[in-house]
Amino acid sequence: DPGHPYAHARIAEARWAEGDLAGAAEHFAAELDVSGGDPDIWVDYAELLSELEKYDQAEQCCRKALELEPDHTAANYCLGELALLRNRPAIAEQHFHHVLKAEEDYPGIHAKLAEALIRRGRIQQAAKHLVTEMRRSGDDPVMLQELGQLLLEAHLSRHANGVLRRLVDLSPDDPCAQHNLAVSFFRMHRIDDGIRHCRKALKLKPEYPLALYNLALAHIQKGQIQRARRYAAKALTLSPNDEHLRRLSERLEGSSFWTKVRAHLNGRRNNRKNPD
């Protein structure tokens, strides 16, 4: 019965799960005609609108949920996420603090608050929340992935390495996990370990420009310019508009030019010393 409360919401969730975001949005809008007094429906709709990158509408839905229930934690959490997506970390921090004050055990709240603090350059405060989230996350691969990335952003490489090792143990076939673990090793100046995990990431996902880029940088550090050039060229083929890759390739081509010049000059000097 389309007029029955939550009938459209159930259809919307099913369409959403199938990837039909536009269809899901239609049914959420229809549900609000029936159950417009339920703040949870407004937040669900806001999360869908966020996926559709309709951030203004999503924010309006969250505000409506807060009008109906001023301390609604999910609405504040959603507003915090929207603020991060729009690069407004100070506003995000405010909303996440509201959530933490209302519900200290809200899933993922310490990680999100840490992300907002990192973006504001408040690394020490972020580190405390990251450690708290590490203790609570257990073996949830999604949370471990997010924690590892945030710890890398906070330049807490050893902590990141520990989290990402756990993640790789749980999800050895995840190329992103392998690559992030490689990055943590590079940050710790353990170049060979980083190269090993970069190669594992590329074995799982051969067309992985970021892994190829970092592998090229690692081989530059080892003085292996030919290998670096090969990886950089492949990465640039996959992402021809990436400015970092373009600069790296130009840098490597420049090193190739001067290597040939030096070899030529050395050859001429040797000829002068040993005339026929």
Image: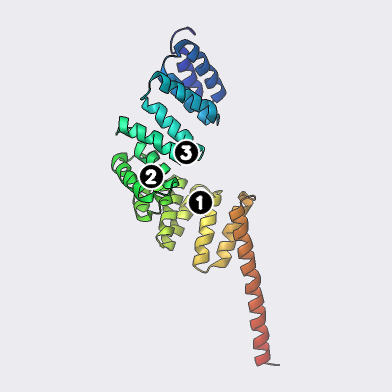
What amino acid type is highlighted by mark number 2?
Leu
Front-lying residue, 44 or 177: 44
- The secondary structure type at the circle numbered 1 is helix
Residue 11 x, y percent position in the rendering? 48, 17
Instruction: Measure the alpha-carbon separation of dots 2 and 1.
Output: 22 Å
Q: Is residue 209 above or below residue 190?
A: above
Residue at the image position 40 percent from the left and 51 percent from the top:
154
**Quarter where residue 41 is shown:** top left
Instruction: Measure the alpha-carbon separation of dots 1 and 3.
Output: 30 Å
Looking at the image, residue 162 sits to the left or right of residue 3; the answer is left
Looking at the image, residue 230 sits to the left or right of residue 95; the answer is right
Q: Quadrant of the C terminus?
A: bottom right
- The secondary structure type at the circle numbered 3 is helix
Label 2, residues with CA under 10 Å away: few <14, some 14-19, many ≥20? many
Residue at the image position 45 percent from the left and 31 percent from the top:
79
Q: Which residue is mark 1?
A: 202
Task: Name which of mark 2 and mark 3 comes first in the sequence.
Answer: 3
What amino acid type is highlighted by mark number 3?
Leu
- The secondary structure type at the circle numbered 2 is helix
- The answer to whether residue 72 is seen in the rendering is yes
Which-is-in-front pick, marks 1 and 3?
3
Q: Which residue is mark 2?
A: 147
